[in-house]
Structures are given as structure tokens and as C-alpha cells.
Amino acid sequence: MAHAPLSASDDVHTTYSRRTPGSRSLYERALRDLPGGETRTSTFFQPHPLFMARGEGALLFDQDGNRYLDFLGNYTSLVHGHAHPDITAAITRQLGLGSAHGACTEAQNRLAALIKSRVRSVERIRFANSGTEAVMQSVRTARAWTGRPRIVKMVGGYHGSWDPVMVGMKGPDHNTPGLSPVLADETLLTTFNDPEAAVRLVSEHEDEIAAIIVEPMLGSTGAIPADREFLLTLRNLADETGALLVFDEIQTFRLNPGGAQ
């Protein structure tokens, strides 16, 4: 009896499963304790996600000893690669001095001064534990300053896992299940790189808008850079209406020492 030839996807799945039994075993164990077998949705794929054992420079090594050239860099955060010796040495030195003092440190002064030296627009800095927390603080500051409730964001823009900025991540009419409808209603959506659409939206709601938040490069939607005209339009709209313009430079700070600014 003749068998149909394997499709390309079948062949890839077969090869992958044969090469990664250690990852499959760890994934099956993880299913007992973690919903879906992992806690970071972006690292999951079928038939099972990879479990890495170590990284070195631009390379990753999985539990079965397979070697990979890492083009992801933990979603661009590891611009120096894995286990860079200078960074490893600095972390080791600091661990010997304590990792969390619950007080001010001289190191935060040095880091703040360094960031200010790279970005001319920055006057003061407040550190946060995550990008999500930084966005929350920026929006709260804008609301406190303006006394207005709403924000403008881009369709497809990613600003973390806070309900108001998760609106429109997968399209203007598709939101992640579980978002608060009350909070979602405070977010106005416009189209990235469409200055005319931004002008129309802001003109309709100018007395309600506390902040316009934008990534100078739309990250999770395909690394699409913003047109200069579009960013200048947002700058002018914010100035004209008294709203604050928030640049989310989580990714673009990794492309240039001074970010997109």
C-alpha cells in the first residue's frame, strides 16, 4: 500500500521531535504545574517549546545539546549577547555587595546621568521594574497633569500587559479576552503612520485626551519604523491640545544610544 509523501511541515515536525526529546520531557513535566506548560506565551509553539540549557555570545544550547544561532536576543533585550564576560563580572561583583538594599544607591545616580547624556529631551528619570510599569506610570502622570481620562494609541502597538494599552493589539476590532470594557473605553485607536487619521481622531476628542502613546518603531507588528512626518504630527497635536506625547522606546533604545529621538 502506497503512502502519501510527507509534507514540508510534517518533515520539519518529525525532525524537530527527533532532535529534542529532552525539551519534550521537560514540557510534559511543566504541564503538571504551569498552564499550557509555560508562562511566556511568545515562547510557545507546537509540538513542544524548546527548553534552553545555556547561552554563549550569539549561541544558544538546548537540553539535548543542539546549538542555535540566536537571532532573537530575548526579543532584542540582549544586545550584548549571552553571558558577556564584562556583564557577568559586573553582576558577580554586585551580588557580593547585596542585590536589593531597599534604599537609594550610587549606581542609580550613575545610570540616570548616563541616560540623560544620551537623550537630550530627558530632564528627570524614574526607574520602573518593567516596561508595563513604566507605561502605567507615564499614563497616570499624563492624567494627573491634564485632568483628562483618555489616551490615544496605535492599532497593533505593544506597550505591555496593562488593560488600557492592550486594546487594539491584534486589530481595531479584536481585543484580548478578559480586558475590562471600562478601561478599554478609555483608549482611542488610530492608524500607525497615518497623520491624517491621527488629526481627525484627536480633533474629535481633544478635550478628553491625556496622552498620545506611540512606539517610534512598531515592534510586535513587524518592526515598522515611524515616518518622521507622522511623529512630528503627533508632536504638534500634543502641543496644540495640551496632551502629553509618550515615546515608548523599549525597542528603539536598543537600536541607537539615544533611541529614536
Image (spheres, rainbow, N blue to C red):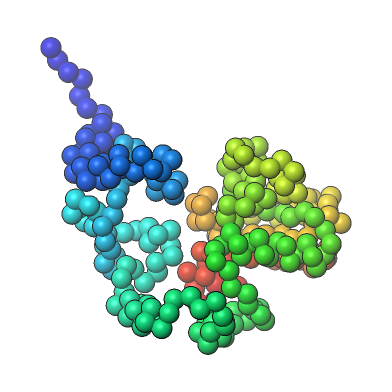
Query: For the C terminus, which image quadrant?
Result: bottom right
Identified at 43% across, 48% down, the residue is: 39
Identified at 68% across, 50% down, the residue is: 164
Residue in front for this viewpoint, 145 or 229: 145
Whether residue 68 can be seen here: no
Identified at 22% across, 52% down, the residue is: 63
In percent of width and height, residue 48 lies at: 31, 40
In percent of width and height, residue 188 lies at: 73, 49
Identified at 74% across, 66% down, the residue is: 141
Count of picture labels: 0
In percent of width and height, residue 124 lies at: 66, 80
**Splitting the image into 4 quarters, where does residue 77 fall?**
bottom left
Furthest residue toward left: 1
Residue in front for this viewpoint, 208 or 135: 135
| Location of residue 211 with respect to 166 vertically, above or below | below
Residue in front for this viewpoint, 142 or 79: 142
Query: For the N terminus, which image quadrant?
Result: top left
Residue 55 located left or right of residue 155: left
Residue 184 located left or right of residue 95: right
Residue in front for this viewpoint, 253 or 84: 84
In percent of width and height, residue 163 lies at: 64, 49
**Splitting the image into 4 quarters, where does residue 47 fall?**
top left
Whether residue 83 can be seen here: yes
Furthest residue toward top: 1
